Image: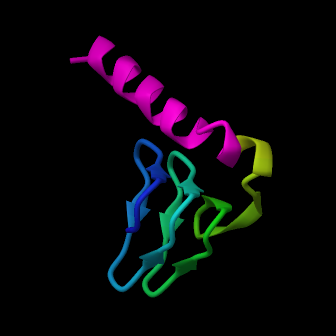
């Protein structure tokens, strides 16, 4: 798993997967063995598949990092 990747809660990443930078794996997604997540893509589902590209605006605004920070905040509420 590269830098600047958001892995949603409950997602499963099986052996041999390659997750490239600036990508998002949706909550509950299942990356089957050997899946390659392209840089700048959003993957969701079971089995996970590419559903769309991360927008240039999202990348420029640092949205992946902001979403990750919110995940940490929400997780703290349930400890």
Region rendered in magenta: 59-79
Residue 76, horizontal then vertical, whole percent? 28, 17
Is 65 part of what is drawn in magenta?
yes
Is 48 part of what is drawn in magenta?
no
How is the protein colored in the picture? rainbow
Residue 49, horizontal then vertical, whole percent? 67, 70
Q: Say which residue appears at 40% left-offset and 19% top-offset.
A: 74
Q: Quadrant of the N terminus?
A: bottom left
Q: In the image, 10: left or right of 76?
A: right
Above-or-below relation of 1 to 4: below
Q: Quadrant of the C terminus?
A: top left
Residue 26, horizontal then vertical, whole percent? 57, 50
Extreme residue toward the left, this view: 79
Above-or-below relation of 6 to 42: above
How many labels sit on residues? Answer: 0
Extreme residue toward the top, this view: 77
Q: Quadrant of residue 50?
A: bottom right
Q: Say which residue appears at 56% left-offset and 58% top-offset.
A: 22
Residue 3, horizontal then vertical, whole percent? 41, 60
């Amino acid at each position: 798993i590269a830098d600047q990747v958001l892995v949603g809660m409950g997602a499963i990443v099986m052996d041999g997967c390659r997750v490239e930078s600036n990508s998002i794996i949706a909550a509950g997604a299942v990356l089957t063995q050997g899946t390659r997540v392209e840089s700048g893509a959003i993957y969701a589902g079971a089995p996970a598949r590419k559903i769309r590209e991360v927008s240039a605006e999202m990348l420029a605004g640092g949205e992946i990092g902001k979403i990750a920070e919110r995940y940490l905040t929400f997780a703290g509420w349930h400890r």
